[in-house]
């Protein structure tokens, strides 16, 4: 059953200090590599037409500490190709907030100019008054995608078999949403 979105009516934007957008991929078959984006925007609009979620991140804001590796990931055609595609974006086609606190969002994810259907599951925190008299809510979403679907083709074989970098990438988003006046 879908929960009433009455308290969610209006426009909400992600608080950049208290929100994160991250990806994680298997590395060398034994570890995981994670990075986040520091420059992003996300909004939720809820009205009589339903709930809509949109967001984008700037590729150049990816948080990778090693400069040469970061440059390859940001600019390399086999990764983000940020010179040609400076943003990743998402637009929902359906958002479901269930009365048990779970959530599902379906929509379109665009990376490197390639738009694919995308679904994520997660949880939400209903709107509440914050310590400063504003209204806030929260969503946490997670999904796993195959990076080859967006032409992220870099790979190196490991000496005893397997791949240096996993094909599956876990995407996570936590957005603390602030109601706009």
Image (cartoon, rainbow, N blue to C red):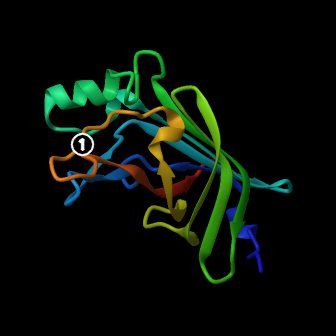
Residue 125 position (above or below residue 117): below
Given residues 4 and 153, the one toward you in this image is 153
Given residues 7 and 132, the one toward you in this image is 7
Classify the position of the N terminus by image quarter. Answer: bottom right
Furthest residue toward right: 48
User: Residue 117 location in percent, x, y?
Assistant: 67, 46
Left or right relative to 24: residue 7? right
Q: At 42% from the left edge and 53% from the top edge, which residue is drawn?
A: 168
Please tell me in which quadrant of the rendered image residue 42 appears: top right
Residue 14 position (above or below residue 65): below
Residue wearing tag 1: 157
Given residues 34 and 133, the one toward you in this image is 34
Q: At 33% from the left edge and 22% from the top edge, which residue is drawn?
A: 76
Please tell me in which quadrant of the rendered image residue 4 appears: bottom right
User: Residue 178 location in percent, x, y?
Assistant: 53, 54
Furthest residue toward top: 83
Left or right relative to 125: residue 8? right
Residue 69 position (above or below residue 32): above
User: Residue 173 location in percent, x, y?
Assistant: 46, 55
Left or right relative to 25: residue 157? left
Residue 59 position (above or below residue 159): above
Q: At 74% from the left edge and 76% from the top edge, which residue is drawn?
A: 3
Furthest residue toward bottom: 100
Please tell me in which quadrant of the rendered image residue 78 appears: top left
Q: At 13% from the left edge and 34% from the top edge, which residue is drawn?
A: 66
Query: Is residue 21 at all visible to an observer of this figure?
Result: no
Query: Is residue 172 at all visible to an observer of this figure?
Result: yes
Q: How many marks?
A: 1
User: Residue 49 location in percent, x, y?
Assistant: 85, 53
**Mark 1 surroundings within 10 Å by alpha-carbon count, few (fewer than 14), some (14 through 19), many (20 or more):** few
Report helix, strand or loop for mark 1. Answer: loop
């Amino acid at each position: 059953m879908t929960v009433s979105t009455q308290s969610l009516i209006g426009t909400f934007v992600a608080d950049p200090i208290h929100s994160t957008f991250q990806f994680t991929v298997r590395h060398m078959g034994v570890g995981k590599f994670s990075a986040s984006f520091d420059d992003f925007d996300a909004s939720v609009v809820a009205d009589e037409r339903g709930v809509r979620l949109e967001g984008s991140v700037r590729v150049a804001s990816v948080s990778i500490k090693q400069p040469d590796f970061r440059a390859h990931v940001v600019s390399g055609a086999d990764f983000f190709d940020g010179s040609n595609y400076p943003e990743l974006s998402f637009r929902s086609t359906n958002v479901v907030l269930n009365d048990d606190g779970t959530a599902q969002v379906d929509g379109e994810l665009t990376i490197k100019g390639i738009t694919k259907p995308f679904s994520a599951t997660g949880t939400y925190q209903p709107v509440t008054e914050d310590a400063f008299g504003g209204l806030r809510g929260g969503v946490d979403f997670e999904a796993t995608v195959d990076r080859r679907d967006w032409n992220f083709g870099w790979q190196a074989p490991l000496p005893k078999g397997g791949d240096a970098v996993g094909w599956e990438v876990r995407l996570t988003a936590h957005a603390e949403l602030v109601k706009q006046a």
